[in-house]
Image (cartoon, helix red, strand yellow):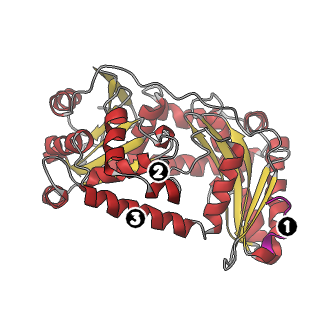
Amino acid sequence: MRSLLRVERHDLGGGVTLYTQGAIASSRITVASWISPAGSSRDPPGKEGLAALTGRLLVTGTRKWDKRELARRLDRIAATLSVDVSWDGVTAEITGPTVVEQELLDILSEVVAHPRFDPAEVVRIRTAMEERLARDASQPSHRAERAFLETLFPEGHPYHRNPGGNRRSVRALRPRDVADFHHRNYRTGGSKIVITSRSEERAVLRAVKARMPPLPDGTTTRPSLPGRTPPGAPREIALPIAGSQQVEILVGGIAPSRTHPAFSALRMGNEVLGGRPILSRLFQSVREQEGLAYDTESDVTMLPEGGFWSAAAGTGAKTVRRVLGILQRETRRMMTQPVSPEELHAIRESFIGSFLLHTDTPLAAHSFADEVATYDLPPDHFETWPAELRRLTPEDIRTAMAEHLEGWARPLVVVAGPPEGVRSIRGG
C-alpha cells in the first residue's frame, strides 16, 4: 500500500520533474498541479504585476478553447481549475474525478502550454488588478504588511515588491508583454508536475509523459539577490490612514529559508507563540486575559529566498501601546525562556492532530506534495515529520528561535490605522 504522505520524484527530462503522491483507496478524486518558477521575482523593472496578470489569464482560454468552451469542458467533467502566483513561482492546479484523470491532464497541459491571452481578457483582468490595488491602499492590514516587507527586504529583492504590482505598472501592461513573459518564463526548465491520485504510479507516469507538453531542454537560473534590511532602515513606522477604524500592529524581522535545518523547531515555536488558535500565548494574553484585540497571531514564513517572522494584532486606537507591549514581551519570552514541557506537549499534539486530519482528502494532502516539490524535500519528509516534532525539546525550540529569527531583541514595528491610533509610534 502506498503511503499517503510519501512523494516520489521522477525526472522527465528537459528540466521538468514529476512528483507522485498516493491517495486513500476509497478516493475518487485526482489533483494535479504544474509549478513553474515564473513568479513575480521575474517581473521586468517597470512591469511589476506582469507575472500575476499572466497567471490569472491562464484560466481564460487556450488556443483550442475560448473562455466559454474551457468553462464548459471543466463543468462537464466536474473539474475545477485555479492558478496562484507568488513571489517565487506560479501554480496551476486542476481537481476532478479520477475516472477522467487523463482528460484532467490534457486540460492542464493545454492551459499551461497554450494560453490564448485574449486582448479583451487582458484588459478585464488588468482593470480588476488596478481596482484591487486601489482598495488595498485603504486597508491598514495591507499597508502594514507592505511597509514591513519593503523595509525588511531592500529594493531588488523579490520579497520587497508587491506580487500584484503597483497601479502605474499594471496600467501599462499590454497583451504583448504577457505573451513575451509566458514565452520566456514558462517554456524553460525548472517546472514541476505534482499529482495526487489512487491510480497506479506507473500508469500516472505514462499518462504524464503522453500528455504534458514538451519543453525546451534547459534549467532555470535564479536571479541574483541583494542583501537584506538596508543599514539605517527605520525600526518604527507609523502609517496614518484617514477613515480607517482598526489599528493593525505588526512586529517582526528576518527568518531563514524553508530548507534551513531549524525549520521544524521554528514552526513549533511559532505555534506556541501565536500560530495555534486559542492555545497560543498571544491569543491567551492579548484576547483572553486582556481583551485588547479583535485578532492576534504570529507567523514564520520560510520561502526559497529567505523568510520573515511576525507577531500581529488588530486593536482599537486607545490600546495600541498596551498591545504592542504584549507582542514584544511574549516574543522576547519565547527567545529567552524555554516553554514548559506541559505547554509544548499540548500545543504540539494539537498541531500534529490538525496536520494528520489534512491527509485524509486528496486536495488537502496535495498541498504537502506541492511543498515537497517546491523545496525539493526528501520523499518521506511528511511521513517522518510527526516523529521529528515529538523529538523537539523546549530548549531546542528556544535556541532555534533565538538564533535564527533576526531582530527579536529590537523588532521592526509597523502600525497602520486611524491617525489618533498611530500618533505614539515614531517614524513614518
Q: Which residue is drawn at 24% across and 54% down?
A: 118
| Residue identified by numbered label 1 | 321
- From this view, report whether residue 38 is shown above or below residue 172: above
Gap between marks 3 and 2, in whole Å?
12 Å
Of mark 1 and mark 2, the one earlier in the sequence is 2
Q: Where is residue 126 in the image (x, y as percent from the top left)?
A: 39, 59
Looking at this view, is 391 or 156 the one in front? 156
Q: How crowded is mark 2: few (under 14 residues within 10 Å), some or many (20 or more)?
A: many
Q: In which quarter of the image is the C terminus?
A: bottom right
Q: How crowded is mark 1: few (under 14 residues within 10 Å), some or many (20 or more)?
A: some
| Residue identified by numbered label 3 | 127
Task: Judge whether residue 279 can be spotted in this image.
Answer: no
Name the residue type under label 2.
Gly
Of mark 3 and mark 2, the one earlier in the sequence is 2
Gap between marks 3 and 1, in whole Å?
39 Å
Q: Judging from the image, what secondary structure is the residue with disc 3 in?
A: helix
Name the residue type under label 3.
Thr
Looking at this view, is 369 or 352 the one in front? 369
Name the residue type under label 1.
Arg
Q: Residue 49 carries which label?
A: 2
- From this view, report whether residue 199 is shown above or below residue 328: above
Q: Judging from the image, what secondary structure is the residue with disc 1 in?
A: helix
The magenta segment is 421-428
* Eye-nearest disc, 1 or 2: 2
Q: Where is residue 81 in the image (x, y as percent from the top left)?
A: 28, 53
Of mark 3 and mark 1, the one earlier in the sequence is 3
**In contact (CB < 8 Å): disc 3 and disc 1:** no
Residue 5 sits in which quadrant? top left
Q: Where is residue 38 in the image (x, y as percent from the top left)?
A: 41, 38
Q: How many labels does the image show?
A: 3
